Image: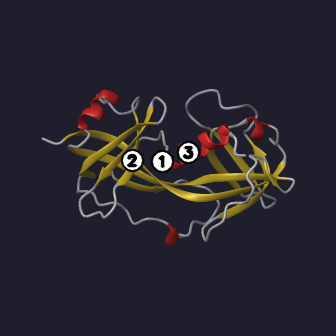
Amino acid sequence: MISSNFRSAILFVSIVFSIACGSGGSQKIVEDSSPIDSSTLKAPLPVDKDGSTQGLLKTVEDAGYPMATLTIQLPNQKEAEYFDINLEEVEHVTMPILNSFIGKNVNLSFKTETVNTLLDIYADGKSIFGEEFAPEGDYIKTIEGKLDGAKEVTPGDLPGKVSITDEKSQKLDFEFFITPEMVAVDQKRVKGYYDFLTRNTITTISKSE
């Protein structure tokens, strides 16, 4: 049986969460000591010379204030892209305003970064979340070492940050909603399963005239 806390944590991370702000259309890799296989990453999304672009806003999903996730169809892209937005960091934008943009073209600037996404944690050979099988896939990676940063359950609507450090002092950071299961193995040796996630974070958005 999968814990409800684990479901919430994975869901939130998977719908492209970020609270970072920056210049529109910039491309960035979040720094850590692990190599990133460029073949697993998407090509940069198209932007104009000023770092902005235009697209059709298809959906707006509340991801827990101040975050929201937007689905936007960009020009010359076969599939719609996911973008997240921090309503406390983008001026003159609220959920009602975003909802009024649905079905309309919008102008936006955004920041792209690639981060580690924690999928599961094993301790003593078992998933601490009760998963029957370990994550599988060509691009799934693992790290074994001491879990740090899970001293208490995440108290609010935004995820906390934990890390796993291996015997060679390689340290990977993960944003995650810390659960009681994680608190129980804080400072202990664990095996983390993770993947890479590309996040598109909106820095400005307005309805196209």
Disc 1 packing (10 Å; few <14; some 14–19; many ≥20): many
Discs 2, 1 touching: Cβ within 8 Å: yes
As drawn, 86 above or below 51: above
Q: Residue furthest front?
A: 1
Residue under circle 2?
83
Discs 1, 3 touching: Cβ within 8 Å: no
Q: Nearer the viewer, mark 2 or mark 3?
A: 3
At numbered mark 2, what does the secondary structure look like: helix, strand or loop? strand
At numbered mark 3, what does the secondary structure look like: helix, strand or loop? helix
Marks 1 and 3, how far apart at CA:
9 Å
Is 85 displayed left or right of 184 in the figure?
left
Q: Mark number for residue 11?
A: 3
Discs 2, 3 touching: Cβ within 8 Å: no
- Residue at horizontal 70 percent and vertical 52 percent from the top: 120
Q: Mark number for residue 16?
A: 1
Q: Residue furthest left?
A: 209
Marks 2 and 3, how far apart at CA:
15 Å
Q: Earlier in the sequence, mark 2 or mark 1?
A: 1
Is 54 displayed left or right of 156 in the figure?
left
- Residue at horizontal 49 percent and vertical 31 percent from the top: 64
Amino acid type, mark 1: Val
- Residue at horizontal 43 percent and vertical 65 percent from the top: 42
Q: Position of residue 87 (x, y in %)?
A: 39, 31
Q: Position of residue 114 (x, y in %)?
A: 50, 56
Amino acid type, mark 3: Leu
Amino acid type, mark 2: Phe
At numbered mark 1, what does the secondary structure look like: helix, strand or loop? loop
